[in-house]
Image (cartoon, helix red, strand yellow):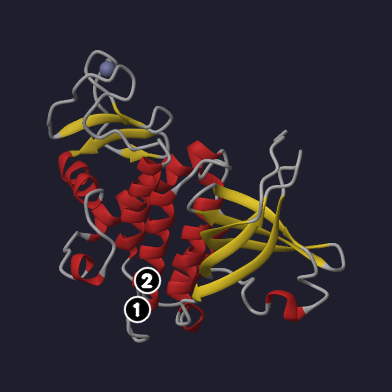
Amino acid sequence: MRKRSGPCEATPCLVLRVVDYGDADRIVTLLTAAHGKISALAKGARSSRRRFGAALSSFGFGEAMLEERRGQDLWSLSDLHVTRGFPNLPHELSRFGHAAYACELCLHLCPPHVPEPEVLRLLVTLLDYLDGLPLTDKPSPLGLRIFELRLLSAVGLALQLYDCAACGGPVPAAPLVPIDVRRGGVLCSDCFLGPVPTELGPQGGGLHATLRDTLALLGTLPIDHAALAPLAIEARSQRQARELLQSLIENHLGHGLRAVEFIAKMNTFGPS
Ligand SMILES: [Zn+2]
């Protein structure tokens, strides 16, 4: 239970989720620069639209006036001034799905009350990329892979590609190295005995050098059109990267994510 109660303060934030609370209020989950992920009570947000206007909608980036409440986990939100709205996100389903997935990932992977300026920057960068695409263009799924890799690193759950996830020792380059999803990365020959599996499954298996290099490369790239457009990564590696990162994330969370199902359904209705 948190004991401090502070004065009202302004902090940059992004709205991750809004849920109704009672007849008059809403509870907003924000990713803030100063306090990381926090939930705040927006009093009167349901009963009076004037109170917060359209500010309380997903993907809004701006400045929140927040007050910590003595002995309460739920903060108090007195004002939210949206400076960036990402207006193109709702106009095309793929980019909306990608944005919703990224917000859901932050909602579940970021621990509460831990300052996450890097995660906030990363999320705003992804939303900027999605919002800035011409409406005729589909977003690159590789943008999400970069986001996943960098988010996992930022919250201390980096995918281990070169150091053994069990002992920390080096895992030299090889055509095939063992990878264990539950441990979060590759394993050295001291920690993995027996033949390396040739296939990758939900628990891990054998990581081919091509996929290892692809993941390492993606982890270093910025999320923007200039970096994503020239990338030529074969479909098989893209699918394996997606499945491996999905397994890792679900292993950390202990459950799946709604937006993943949304994106999968959307892809069955048209080219991805
Ligand atoms: Zn080891």
> Which of 270/11 is in front?
11
* Image quarter hosting the N terminus: top right
Q: Are marks 1 and 2 in contact (CB under 8 Å)?
A: yes
Residue at numbered disc 2: 128
Q: Is residue 192 visible?
A: no
> Element type at marker 1?
helix
Residue at numbered disc 1: 132
Q: Is residue 139 above or below residue 146?
A: below
Question: Along the horizontal axis of the image, is 29 left or right of 213?
Answer: right
- Identity, as a three-letter code, of the amino acid under mark 2: Asp
The answer to whether the residue bearing label 1 lies less than 8 angstroms from the nearest atom of ligand 1 is no
Q: Is residue 189 above or below residue 105?
A: above
Ligand 1: quadrant of the figure? top left
Question: Along the horizontal axis of the image, is 125 left or right of 232?
Answer: right
Q: Quadrant of residue 178?
A: top left
Question: Along the horizontal axis of the image, is 98 left or right of 167?
Answer: right
Q: Is residue 269 above or below residue 222?
A: below
The answer to whether the residue bearing label 2 lies less than 8 angstroms from the nearest atom of ligand 1 is no
User: How many numbered marks does the figure carry?
Assistant: 2
> Element type at marker 2?
helix
Q: Is residue 83 above or below residue 184?
A: below
